[in-house]
């Protein structure tokens, strides 16, 4: 192989989306000229359409001199949350709770079953790499990526991560022609973000460890190692002033951090798979980017750039530093020329390039892509989201639902007296399909059901409490004031402060991604809520501000403890 061909292996580009497919004009030079053979797809399209589009990518790759097949990766696309750069909207795939809901269901066998379904759906459309699972632990309640984690208990999360990787890779003995390669993320400590800020932004570049609890953040990753995870993605974060086992951890993002990648990950934990950097770490972050904060997107005129701790280096120098620190593939880059340039400048050795290229090629072989990289669009349409799969997804949704309060045994609603329902955030058709009458005035209702979203409060959008100004909270208050029995259904993307929900609603049924149908089936007793809180729920913003970012479940006098949940059969 030429240096250019090896360099093409070492970047992870993005398939350019155009309408219901890919933009061939933009894609062609990436494969033919730049020799790129790994891409993320963000195309949200029906399974047969996605399979057809991915086949076209493989056809183009197969016509190149070495015919190296493309590994196509994706962020999660089976849940209920859609966040730019983190998840893809669900089209035709099996609906299941977000990862945090699997933490609430608390059954690793169920997680394995679900991730096996995801594996089959991905392979059916030609996706062979999942940029998941998140092995981060939810220790800083304000952090906005908690819904991608399995919760706050390191040992419980370890079991969930292990099960997820086994389901996706079709076993625990490495990749096969049935596997989807997992890239477990974000090594390591991302859950301990200072003030809950996110390290997509410069102002959120630090994870902090005031409780001295860094070791707990490593534990879940060992579950991924035990299952043979194919890949690891380092966090963007700088682990602020961390000293671990006598080592002062370098004050650069993990993608540039030879101690975290070489000494710890490769050395102590013997990881020999592919290290894929998170997206944009080699990009330039000008002053406008440094000043940028939410609600503005982290993507701006400068593109996406998270070169934390090495802002003053050139792109070429960042490539060299990252690859020498242990990264095999630069995520989100379509510029392999920087790898070539760094080798020619003597900044990266050819043997290091060979090592990375070999790891990446070996995965393509193990996945069976050299034999057959194509998928059958008709088979994909028949498989994805089929009734058998969706029955498991629905079961998981119900098993994750967490009953927090149930005054006077309101739930499950039984008998024939409840005919008129006020529903906020629930589709009218779902209510009517149950033979119920939908009313617009809560005063006319026998029952009110109000979904509540994460309030994302305050100027930095990390606030966990309802101020009373949110439209969904106002709907709750209107129903309560009308005196109608009211079920509040908060979505726990994070450990929300429900103090002023619990004191008003007659029942609080928390969810982590649930369809209207499964929600109503549970409220009306056809299903049982089976979830237990995967993190504690704090009682006040003051308690949240006082807890330590790196320590699980340590807020003073929580409203509900970790593991809390009622059942319909008996209270406990």
Image (spheres, rainbow, N blue to C red):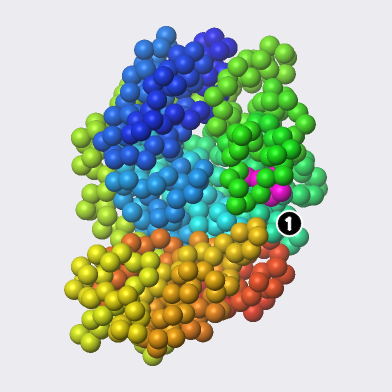
Q: Quadrant of residue 155?
A: bottom right
- Residue 102 sits above or below residue 51 on the image: below
Residue, x 67% and y 76% (percent of image)? 556
Query: Which of the 4 image quarters holds residue 271?
Result: top right
Q: Secondary structure at mark 1?
A: loop
**Is residue 220 depicted above or below 35 in this figure?**
below
Q: How many marks?
A: 1
Q: Look at the image and tell me in which quarter the C terminus lies.
A: bottom left
Viewer-side residue, 455 vs 348: 455
What percent of the width, then of the height, locates residue 503? 51, 84
Q: Identify which residue is drawn at 61% across, 76% down.
A: 539
**Of residues 367 and 315, the one drawn nearer to the viewer in this rendering:** 315
When the figure is inspected, residue 284 is found, relative to residue 4, above or below; the finding is: below
Which residues, given as a range, are shown in magenta? 200-204
Q: Give the residue furthest to the bottom.
A: 408
Residue at 30% from the left image edge and 82% from the top image edge? 445
Task: List the residue tagged with mark 1.
Answer: 209
**Quarter where residue 537 is shown:** bottom right
Q: Residue 336 in the image: state x and y as whole percent.
A: 58, 20
Q: Position of residue 372 (x, y in %)?
A: 31, 24
Chief secondary structure of the magenta span? Answer: helix
């Amino acid at each position: 192989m030429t240096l250019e061909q090896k360099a093409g292996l070492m970047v992870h580009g993005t398939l350019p989306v155009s309408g219901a497919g890919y933009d061939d004009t933009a894609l062609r030079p990436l494969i033919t000229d730049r020799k790129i053979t790994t891409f993320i797809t963000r195309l949200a399209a029906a399974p047969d359409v996605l399979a057809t589009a991915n086949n076209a990518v493989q056809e183009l790759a197969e016509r190149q001199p070495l015919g190296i097949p493309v590994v196509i990766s994706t962020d999660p696309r089976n849940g209920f949350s859609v966040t730019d750069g983190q998840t893809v909207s669900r089209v035709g795939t099996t609906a299941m709770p977000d990862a945090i809901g699997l933490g609430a269901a608390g059954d690793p066998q169920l997680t394995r079953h679900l991730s096996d379904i995801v594996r089959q759906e991905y392979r059916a459309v030609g996706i062979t790499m999942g940029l998941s699972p998140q092995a981060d632990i939810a220790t800083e309640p304000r952090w906005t990526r908690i819904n991608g984690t399995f919760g706050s208990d390191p040992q419980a999360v370890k079991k969930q991560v292990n099960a997820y990787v086994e389901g996706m890779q079709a076993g625990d003995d490495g990749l096969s022609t049935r596997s989807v390669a997992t890239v477990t993320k974000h090594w390591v400590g991302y859950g301990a973000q200072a003030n809950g800020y996110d390290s997509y932004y410069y102002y959120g570049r630090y994870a902090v460890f005031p409780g001295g609890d860094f070791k707990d953040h490593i534990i879940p990753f060992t579950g991924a190692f035990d299952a043979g995870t194919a890949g690891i993605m380092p966090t963007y974060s700088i682990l602020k002033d961390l000293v671990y086992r006598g080592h002062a951890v370098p004050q650069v993002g993990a993608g540039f951090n030879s101690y975290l990648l070489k000494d710890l990950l490769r050395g102590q934990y013997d990881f020999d798979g592919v290290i894929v950097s998170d997206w944009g770490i080699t990009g330039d972050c000008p002053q406008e980017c440094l000043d940028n904060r939410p609600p503005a997107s982290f993507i701006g005129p400068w593109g996406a750039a998270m070169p934390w701790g090495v802002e003053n280096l050139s792109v070429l120098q960042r490539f060299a530093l990252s690859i020498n620190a242990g990264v095999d593939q630069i995520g989100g880059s379509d510029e392999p020329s920087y790898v070539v340039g760094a080798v020619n400048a003597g900044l990266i050795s050819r043997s290091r390039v060979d090592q990375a290229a070999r790891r990446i090629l070996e995965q393509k072989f193990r996945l069976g892509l050299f034999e057959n990289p194509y998928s059958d669009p008709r088979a994909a349409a028949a498989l994805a989201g089929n009734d058998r799969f969706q029955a498991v997804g629905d079961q998981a949704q119900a098993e994750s639902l967490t009953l927090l309060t149930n005054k006077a045994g309101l739930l499950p609603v039984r008998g024939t007296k409840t005919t008129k329902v006020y529903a906020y955030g629930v589709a009218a058709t779902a209510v009517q399909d149950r033979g119920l009458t939908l009313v617009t005035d809560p005063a006319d209702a026998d029952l009110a059901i109000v979904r509540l979203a994460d309030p994302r409060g305050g100027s930095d959008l990390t606030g966990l409490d309802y101020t009373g100004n949110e439209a969904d909270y106002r709907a709750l208050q209107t129903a309560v004031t009308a005196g109608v029995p009211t079920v509040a259904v908060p979505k726990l993307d994070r450990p929300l402060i429900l103090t002023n929900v619990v004191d008003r609603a007659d029942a609080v049924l928390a969810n982590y991604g649930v369809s209207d149908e499964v929600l109503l089936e549970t409220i009306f007793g056809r299903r049982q809520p089976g979830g237990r809180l995967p993190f504690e729920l704090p009682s006040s913003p003051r308690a949240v501000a006082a807890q330590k970012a790196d320590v699980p479940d340590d807020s003073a006098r929580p409203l509900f403890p970790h593991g809390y949940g009622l059942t319909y059969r008996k209270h406990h």
